[in-house]
C-alpha cells in the first residue's frame, strides 16, 4: 500500500511503439504546418525577437572581410618559411631517431634477457 511519502516515477524514455509515418502522412503533416504559418515566415523575424545589432568592425577587420567576400586571395602577412625545417635537417633528425630506436630496442632485449635468465 502506498503511503503519502512514496513517490511514483514515470519514465518517458521507453521506445515508441508507433510505426514511422508514411510519405502521405508526412505530406499531410507538412501541409497542416505550412497552412498555419504566415506567407513571409521565412523572411520576417518573429516580433518577439530583438533587432539585430549592426556590426561595427575596425577598419583592418572590415578590409579583411571585404577581401574574403570579394574572393581575393590572401597576400602579405608574415613569412612562415623560416618556421619550416630544411629538408636536410629533417633527414638527419630522422636518421638519428632511427638510431635511437634501434639502441633502445637492443637495450630492452638485453634487459629482458637479464631479467629472465639473470
Image (cartoon, rainbow, N blue to C red):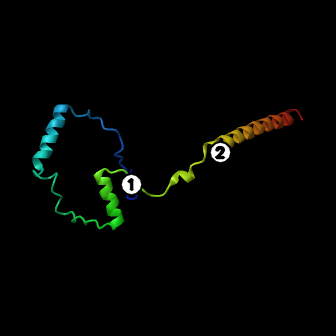
Give the label on residue 89, or none: 2
Instruction: State the CA–CA distance, disc 1 to disc 2.
Output: 72 Å
Residues at circles 1 and 2 in contact by the CB criterion of under 8 Å: no
Q: Residue 111 appears in which quarter of the rendering?
A: top right
Give the camera-side residue of 95 and 77. Answer: 77
Q: Residue at x 29, y 68 (%)?
A: 56
Q: Residue 28: x percent and y percent?
A: 14, 37
Quarter of the image for the C terminus: give it.
top right
Name the foreground residue: 50 vs 6.
50
Residue 14 lies, in percent from the top left, at 35, 41
Q: Residue at x 34, y 46 (%)?
A: 12
Residue 97 location (% of width, % of height): 70, 41
Q: Quadrant of residue 6?
A: bottom left
Q: Which mark is nearer the camera, 1 or 2?
A: 2
Q: Give the vertical position of 117 relative to 75 (above or below).
A: above
Give whichever of 99, 113 is nearer the camera: 99
Residue 1: where, in percent of width, then height? 39, 50
Residue ID at (15%, 45%)? 33
In the picture, the disc for residue 7 is 1
SS type, badge 2: helix
Disc 1 on helix, strand or loop? loop
Q: Relative to residue 3, is residue 34 depicted above or below?
A: above
User: Is 85 drawn above or below residue 44 in the view shown?
Assistant: above
Left or right, 64 with reference to 93: left
The crowding category of the residue bearing disc 2, from other C-alpha atoms within 10 Å (few below 14, some 14 to 19, many at least 20), is: few
Amino acid at each position: 500500500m502506498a503511503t503519502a511519502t512514496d513517490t511514483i516515477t514515470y519514465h518517458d524514455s521507453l521506445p515508441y511503439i508507433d510505426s514511422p509515418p508514411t510519405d502521405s502522412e508526412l505530406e499531410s503533416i507538412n501541409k497542416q504546418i505550412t497552412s498555419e504559418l504566415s506567407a513571409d515566415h521565412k523572411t520576417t523575424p518573429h516580433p518577439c525577437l530583438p533587432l539585430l545589432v549592426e556590426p561595427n568592425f575596425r577598419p583592418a577587420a572590415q578590409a579583411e572581410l571585404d577581401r574574403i567576400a570579394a574572393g581575393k586571395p590572401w597576400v602579405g602577412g608574415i613569412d612562415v618559411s623560416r618556421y619550416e625545417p630544411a629538408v636536410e635537417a629533417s633527414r638527419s633528425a630522422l636518421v638519428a631517431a632511427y638510431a635511437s630506436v634501434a639502441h633502445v630496442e637492443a637495450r630492452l632485449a638485453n634487459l629482458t634477457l637479464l631479467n629472465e635468465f639473470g
